[in-house]
Amino acid sequence: MRFAHHLKLWGALSLAVILIGGVMAMVTGVNLGIDFTGGTMIHVNIGEAFEVSEIRALVEPFALEPDIIHAGFDDTQVIIKTKASLDNTQRMAVFNTLSEAYDLTTEDFLEAEQFGPAIGQELQGKALSSILFASIGMLLYITFRFELIYGVTAIIALIHDVLILLSVFVIFQIPINSSFIAAVLTIVGYSINDTIVVFDRVRENVKTMGRESYKEVADRSLKQTLTRSINTSLTTLLVIGSLYVLGVEAIKEFALPLMTGVLVGTYSSIFIASPLWATIKDMRRGAKRKG
């Protein structure tokens, strides 16, 4: 398959997803979790095994639209997070409902906490700063190890990955919370690793390219590393998928963006980073010949 010769097609597909996500963000908004919007957290010791669906059914009359996760060493505690700002009377009403169902005492009401949106703003700022510093560091490293054009295309691919991941969450209205931010930072490192492996093979093939175009060199390099990229992604997805299927809600919140990010990162390493590098290099070579 001629990967590098169809950059316009791959770019159009990615741009379509990003544009759809942008339009939906403006029309329906972004489904921000409690970490960004503020709200209330209630922590209760149930004292026995329970299903999240049971707790959700019990608190449904309060119209909280909560995030409910297991907690405690043996998963016998529950944490209820809601964007609603509940006063003490309302929190006690929620606890009393659980108390009647599970025969609890006041000692089982472990804690309740109010969150403000300022925490979310601070989290966003730190996340953006982390991505920015990481991108600068990777740009400098790749430029030192290869050359500037490799670094620039790798960073463009990283930005592509983040935008696609964000767009997917917006399109499907999946809540964006602190787990999403952690997953994004993880995917940034994972994606750049795959891209560097391909670039390393590209650099070796450039030395023997002869009269070939850079797109042909990129295609050859991608074919040589394709099996490795696919196998690495599949084994990673197998592990993360197991965590998503077997894990508790808190693990699922982290595993879902990770799985999406691994797929997007693999896609960008194959269809975006190297084809973009080859296109720019061929354009520069053509400009030199004309000059």
Image (cartoon, helix red, strand yellow):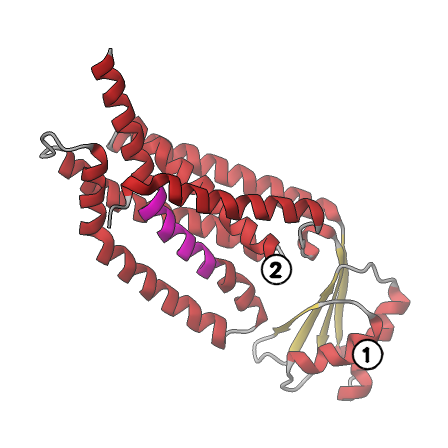
- Report which residue position mark 1 lands on: 106
Q: Earlier in the sequence, mark 2 or mark 1?
A: 1
Name the mark on residue 147: none
Across and down, in percent, residue 1 comes to: 24, 50
User: At numbered mark 1, what does the secondary structure look like: helix, strand or loop?
Assistant: helix
Residue 163 can be seen in this image: no
Relative depth, front residue between 213 and 176: 213
Q: Residue at x 31, y 27 (%)?
A: 148
How would you rate the neighbour count of disc 1 (Cα within 10 Å): few for under 14, some for 14-19, many for 20 or more? few
Name the mark on residue 174: 2
| Res 79 quadrant in image | bottom right
Relative to residue 40, is residue 123 drawn left or right? left
How would you rate the neighbour count of disc 2 (Cα within 10 Å): few for under 14, some for 14-19, many for 20 or more? some
User: At numbered mark 2, what does the secondary structure look like: helix, strand or loop?
Assistant: loop
Across and down, in percent, residue 52 comes to: 65, 78
- The answer to whether residue 230 is above or below residue 51 is above
Q: Residue at x 40, y 36 (%)?
A: 155
| Res 216 quadrant in image | top left
Q: Residue at x 24, y 21 (%)?
A: 286
Magenta span: chief secondary structure: helix
Q: Magenta part of the protein: which range?
A: 258-272
Across and down, in percent, residue 44 comes to: 72, 75
Mark nearer the viewer, 2 or 1: 2
Residue 218 can be seen in this image: yes
- The answer to whether residue 121 is above or below residue 183 is above
Which amino acid, mark 2? Answer: Ile
Relative depth, front residue between 203 and 243: 203
Relative depth, front residue between 205 and 71: 205
Relative to residue 239, is residue 145 drawn left or right? left
Which amino acid, mark 1? Answer: Thr
Q: Residue at x 60, y 55 (%)?
A: 171
- The answer to whether residue 108 is above or below residue 261 is below
